[in-house]
Image (cartoon, rainbow, N blue to C red):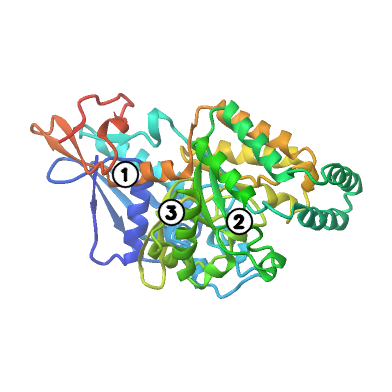
Amino acid sequence: MLALTHDDLLTPGERFALELLVDLSAVLRCEGEGDVVRVRAVGESGISSWSELRAGNWGIDASDGEVRVARSLLRVVLDVAGAEVEQRSSAADRFGRVPSGETGAVRASVDREPVVSLVARTLAAAVRAAAGRRVTRFVDPWPNGRRWAVSLTHDLDVVEWWPAFTALRLAELLRHGEIARLTRVAAAAVASTGRPVVWRAIAALLAEEKRHGVRSTWFVLCDRPTITTARAGDLTYRPDSAQARRIFEALRAAGHEIGLHGSFATSDDHARFGAQRALAHAITGVEPAGVRQHYLRMRAATTPRGMAAAGFAYDSTYGFADRNGFRLGTADVVPLWDAERQQPVGLDEAPFVWMDRALSKYQHVEEPRVWIDDALALAERCRLAEGLWVGVWHPNLTTALGFPDAPQAYARLVGELARGDAHVAPLGELVAWRRARRSLRARLANGGERVQLLGTGSQRATEFTIRDADGRIDHAAHSE
């Protein structure tokens, strides 16, 4: 176990970064007295590069009973995982998004690895090295003794008027010079005239997930569409239409999670979050716990405040539109930071790591097999970091809508991930579990001979696996 020693000189942001690293390390924290490892920040509050920190064991040093963390490390962790760099940026692309090049991860060229999660693992190793004979306990990073986790998510952008989306996709394929693919799409679209193309695609996707025992998270648009919103690619279907209701019923019946896909307006008009969440609840019968912005349209400095005010437990917007990787440097669930107010937002973030359209739309990679190769490569990095892989697959990716071979590619992705050793679950369940793990504390009882768990929140103590420094399960650890 460990205890944090907060220096009064630390800024609120540095304290946030230190707390974040301890949370990601999965070292059980101690409350009260006891001979445990102490962790404290040291040095000046300067700026170092990730390469310099990597060369110096990330600025983490262990001695007998103490682990020292360089304040310069906390600064770069805050820039990336706290998104301070992009919150300070005034740049925006045509969709009102902070460009990838303005993020801390891309600026530091660490966007393809979960550097902050790797730093946390180094911190855990330092605690082991500093512990000696002291009582040290670790919490398994994910439920059921699993060492990493997976969550498959879907953004429901298309329900009605599917031929219009096919026409847009045909134009895109023409620009990319994909004539053979364009021909296949056109033929499939003509053959599908008058048929429920979107529903068939979703039904096939749900059947594939059911075959592997996978429950996923679906972010749905929930406001009244207009000609203007439809032309902008924003609100494109009526959430109370018969087609939409059919989809929502199927999701609920199969045990999938329904979240809100926030419309463009919510990025600035935060009152719309509450209205759209209420409408989603009224139509689906589910009060969404999570939100992801449509087109990832979000003002990093302010939009999360509106999400928190509307009562969402988590967001999953932080990811790249034009590439795949780790925007916040983490493969995990993390609390969001408000750079202007210098305090936590009060909202968890489950950043996605991979999205299908990041490759096909922005990098002109039209072969679905390549998309899946990239998804699995990033999943392996999450596994090595004992983290969480979150992927985005759009359910409209089917031949008649412009994406030949995509359904077969998704079947491969689901199969590979489900057959692995990850804990696979909807985002809402993983976020709730991780929030409870973050609050988990312990104290030494019986003169330091037994570990007593505290603060398990809504989770039962038995839902957490506690291990000693040698990896043995501590069956005696229990809540008071």
Q: Disc 2 or 3, which lies upstream in sequence?
A: 3
Residue underneath mark 3: 314
Disc 2 target residue: 320
Viewer-side residue, 208 vs 121: 208
Could you tell me the amino acid type at mark 1?
Ala
Q: Residue at x 62, y 60 (%)?
A: 295
108 shown above or below 203? below
Please tell me how crowded label 3 is: few (under 14), some (14-19), or many (20+) other residues with Cα within 10 Å. many
Q: Is residue 245 left or right of residue 287?
A: right
Measuring from the top left, give residue 114's x and y in whole percent. Answer: 51, 47
Taking the image as drawn, is residue 397 in sight? no
Q: Residue furthest left?
A: 447
In space, the residues marked 2 and 3 are separated at their CA atoms by 18 Å
Mark 2: secondary structure: loop
Which tag is nearer the camera, tag 2 or tag 1? 1
Q: Which numbered disc, 1 or 3, marks the residue that appears first in the sequence?
A: 3
Quadrant in the rendering for residue 143:
top left
Disc assigned to residue 263: none
Q: Is residue 247 visible?
A: yes
Give coordinates of residue 302: x percent, y percent: 46, 70
Residue name at image x 21 percent, y 30 percent: 477
Instruction: Give the distance between the C-alpha atoms of the residues marked 2 and 1, in whole angstroms.
Output: 28 Å
**What crowding class fits label 2: few (fewer than 14 Cα within 10 Å), some (14-19), or many (20 or more)?**
many
- What's the residue at 37%, 50% (across, down)? 21
Disc 2 residue type (three-letter): Phe
Spatial distance from mark 1 to mark 3, Cα to Cα?
14 Å
Q: Which residue is mark 1?
A: 436
